[in-house]
Image: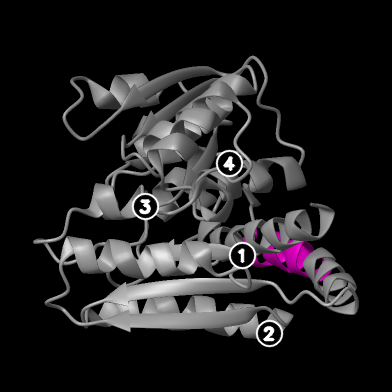
């Protein structure tokens, strides 16, 4: 009978991060500064509206101001960029989050890159990506940062390990690859079109599932004792890994939900508080 894997409890990690943040928020308020995260929602996508509401609620529970900017579905790229620029210029706003995806007619990359780097707490700008690759980003993309936070919380080794990333998005697969590489892992980046994917994954000490396909990673792909971090979140609270099957081989695994997700939101709050702290230090 196989040994039960260590369940990497994202709520536990998230609560630990937020407990430390609560102290920092109180210290900032005593100095006359209240951290503020501005969230921009373009259109009426129900899932996006839910995510924005969740982030707003998380802010308010910690005493962080949640400034909501809701724009019409017909908003142009130029109008969105102007709204972002207004938040850039507001000294009381410490972080800016543009909820994505935006409507198809908007140039999402141009909008992201309008966010000033010191307020890019979600780690979505081209400049932030570059800084992350070089290893000195103040605010790396939140989900990759959450994955590393989970590994660090549970003292899971990274250096010298072979990490296989399944997914290549600019805010998840690519940045987490760079972050693991900067921590001295050997990194292989794969995706849904990689040939012989099962064989490549089976060589991994660390598997990061970030492909956006439910139950895509199969249990018989997992090397016995590997650490599995599932960053997927699909309809029905299903991750990118076949959880039960992967758990049979893994030494440690994140559940979906309550794995990477809560830590991603906690990381966003952490970056916002850190941005507010820097305004006090200036």
Front of the two marks 3 and 4: 3
Q: Is residue 87 above or below residue 183?
A: below
Residue 94 x, y percent position in the rendering: 61, 64
Q: Are marks 2 and 1 in contact (CB under 8 Å)?
A: no
Residue 121 x, y percent position in the rendering: 55, 55
Instruction: Give the mark, 3 or 1, whose residue is nearer the N terminus.
Output: 1
| Residue tagged 4 | 2
Instruction: Give the mark, 2 or 1, whose residue is nearer the N terminus.
Output: 2
Which stretch did the figure color magenta? 9-19
Front of the two marks 3 and 2: 3
Front of the two marks 2 and 1: 1
Q: Which type of secondary structure does the marked residue at label 4 adopt? A: loop
What residue is shown at x 63% (from left), y 81% (from top)? 65
Q: What number is the disc on residue 114?
A: 3
Q: Is residue 63 above or below residue 137?
A: below
| Residue tagged 1 | 94
Q: Is residue 174 left or right of residue 61?
A: left
Compare residues 196 and 3 and report the one nearer the observer.
196
What residue is shown at x 66% (from left), y 48% (from top)? 150
Q: Are marks 3 and 2 in contact (CB under 8 Å)?
A: no
Instruction: Give the mark, 3 or 2, whose residue is nearer the N terminus.
Output: 2
Q: What number is the disc on residue 61?
A: 2
Q: How was this image coloured?
A: one colour
- Residue 17 inside the magenta-drawn segment: yes
């Amino acid at each position: 009978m196989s040994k039960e894997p260590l369940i990497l409890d994202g709520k536990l990690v998230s609560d630990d991060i937020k407990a430390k943040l609560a102290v920092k928020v109180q210290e900032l308020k005593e100095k006359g500064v209240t951290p503020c995260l501005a969230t921009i929602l373009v259109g009426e996508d129900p899932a996006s509206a839910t995510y924005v509401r969740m982030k707003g609620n998380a802010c308010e529970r910690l005493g962080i101001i949640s400034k909501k900017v809701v724009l019409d579905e017909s908003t142009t790229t130029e109008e969105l960029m102007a709204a972002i620029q207004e938040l850039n210029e507001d000294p009381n706003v410490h972080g800016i989050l543009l909820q994505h995806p935006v409507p198809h007619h908007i140039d999402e990359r141009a909008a992201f890159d309008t966010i000033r780097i010191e307020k890019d707490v979600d780690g979505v700008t081209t400049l932030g990506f570059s800084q992350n690759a070089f290893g000195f980003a103040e605010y790396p993309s939140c989900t990759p940062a959450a994955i590393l936070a989970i590994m660090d919380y549970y003292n899971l080794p990274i250096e010298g390990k072979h990490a296989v990333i399944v997914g290549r998005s600019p805010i998840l697969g690519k940045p987490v690859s760079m972050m693991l590489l900067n921590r001295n892992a050997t990194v292989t980046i794969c995706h849904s079109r990689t040939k012989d994917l099962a064989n490549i994954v089976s060589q991994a000490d660390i598997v990061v599932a970030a492909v956006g396909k439910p139950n895509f990673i199969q249990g018989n792909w997992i090397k016995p004792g590997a650490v599995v971090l599932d960053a997927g979140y699909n309809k029905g609270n299903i991750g990118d890994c076949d959880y039960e099957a992967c758990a049979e081989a893994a030494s440690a695994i994140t559940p979906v939900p309550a794995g990477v997700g809560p830590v991603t939101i906690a990381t966003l709050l952490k970056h916002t508080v850190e941005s507010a702290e820097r305004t006090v230090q200036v």
